[in-house]
Amino acid sequence: MTAGPGTPFGANQRMIEREIERRVAEHAEAWFPQGGGRPTVRLRLVTSRPRALLYAVYTEQESRQPTILAKVRRGVSQPAGNDDGARRRPRLATDQLSVSQLTALEYAGLRSIHATFADASPMFGAVRPLDHLVDLDTILMEYVAAGTLRELLVGERRLSFNKRSARNRGATEVWGRAGIWLRTFQTSMLIDDLPARQSRRADVVDRFNAYDEFLRSRIGRRSVGDIATRGAQLAQSVLPERLPMVVGHGDYAPRNMFAGEGARLTVFDPMPRWAVPRYEDLCRFLVAMRLLGLQLHTHGLAYDREGMQRRESQVIRGYCGESPVPAAQLSCYQLLIMLDKWSALVDESHGSWRTQARAVSVRLAVPYLRSEAARLLSSADSAES
């Protein structure tokens, strides 16, 4: 009854659905004692992604509101190399885990986050993990009826008709809470025996040099300019030899946060597999805001500079609290993560004929990426002067 990596998923999907229904029917009374009686379970497929299926699970016959979310991971074959022999892109994390390992890691992360945040503060919610169906690479978790922070950000774009409702839901407070949440998470999570990556200044410099070589080979010296080279110089200048390390969330970004009523923030999709430099997750969040697809493909026109800077400042202040803001180091890490994202965009648009339209879009976005890099480098120069 295993639906692991490489399995023809369609042949097993109905079997997985039946097992989810059976497990929920058996345990729903214990999970939701207020419901009473053995429920009639029904599923609705809400998302089908290359790496996961998401099901809304209903345990009340007439309810329009799901009770449980079921996440079924599935494997995607990883090519050994590009078809044309081109250089593979550098990454911040280089090893790969199996589908089963990823599922177990996410479930453990949800349990840790729930233990930390479930009763911590009315500012925060926590997804309640219910069960891990090991043989099916499936996680059952309590359903959260809220939109994501990414959706909130999209609604705040220029010419949006949803700006008034976004403000009414506490759009201002939620950005600062994203910083507070991360600081609390890092303080609460124990590194234990997690493997570390980029734990030294030299490791960060090496990544800058790797991105420089890759981007120059793919899009040319003229397009990438001296951005990565200056990033390496910045790292040498502002980072300590040994970097302070914390447990990484894995993908700390607005798309992995629910923004509920009263700006109640609930973070999900944890993948705490690495000890990472302290500011990496914070800067990953900031870059995700700045490189939101809408902003990237409109070349920075979707959001005004002042509004984006205000949100960013709120996140940073929430994270730093009363401590001084390490502006130059934050610019350094943002630049590194931006180059990682840029390399991923270039890599994904390289190869098959299906990606040629994407390749054109990436080429057109180069001026915006360069302007973002220039902004970060200028910010670092100002912080050091």
Image (spheres, helix red, strand yellow):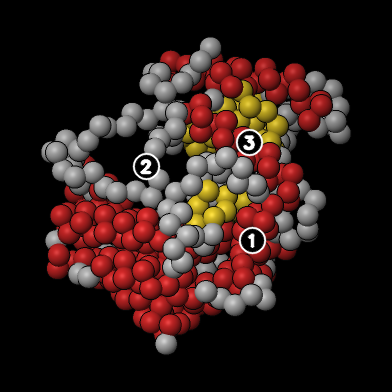
Q: Secondary structure at mark 1?
A: helix
Q: Amino acid at mark 2?
A: Thr
Q: Residue at x 50, y 42 (%)?
A: 195
Residue at label 3?
108
Residue 378 sits in quarter: bottom left
Front residue of 212/292: it is 212
Q: Residue furthest front?
A: 241
Give the distance between the C-alpha atoms of the residues marked 3 and 2, in whole angstroms: 22 Å
Give 203 or 64, whichever is nearer the viewer.
Answer: 203
Looking at the image, residue 132 lies above or below residue 223: above
- In three-dimensional space, the C-alpha distance between marks 1 and 2, rounded to whole angstroms, equals 26 Å
Which amino acid is tagged 1?
Arg
Q: Tag 3, which secondary structure?
A: helix
- Which residue lies at the image location 37% right of the left edge and 42% below the top edge? 94
Q: Nearer the viewer, mark 3 or mark 2?
A: 2
How far apart in space, not on screen, are marks 3 and 1 (Cα)?
Answer: 19 Å
Query: Which corner quadrant holds the C terminus?
Result: bottom left
Q: Dot 2: what SS?
A: loop
Mark 1 lies on residue = 183
| Residue assigned mark 2 | 94
Residue at far bottom of view: 385
User: Which mark is first along the chain, 2 or 1?
Assistant: 2
Amino acid residing under circle 3? Ala
User: Circle 1: is it few (<14), some (14-19), or many (20+) Cα within 10 Å?
Assistant: some
3 or 1: tag closer to the N-terminus: 3
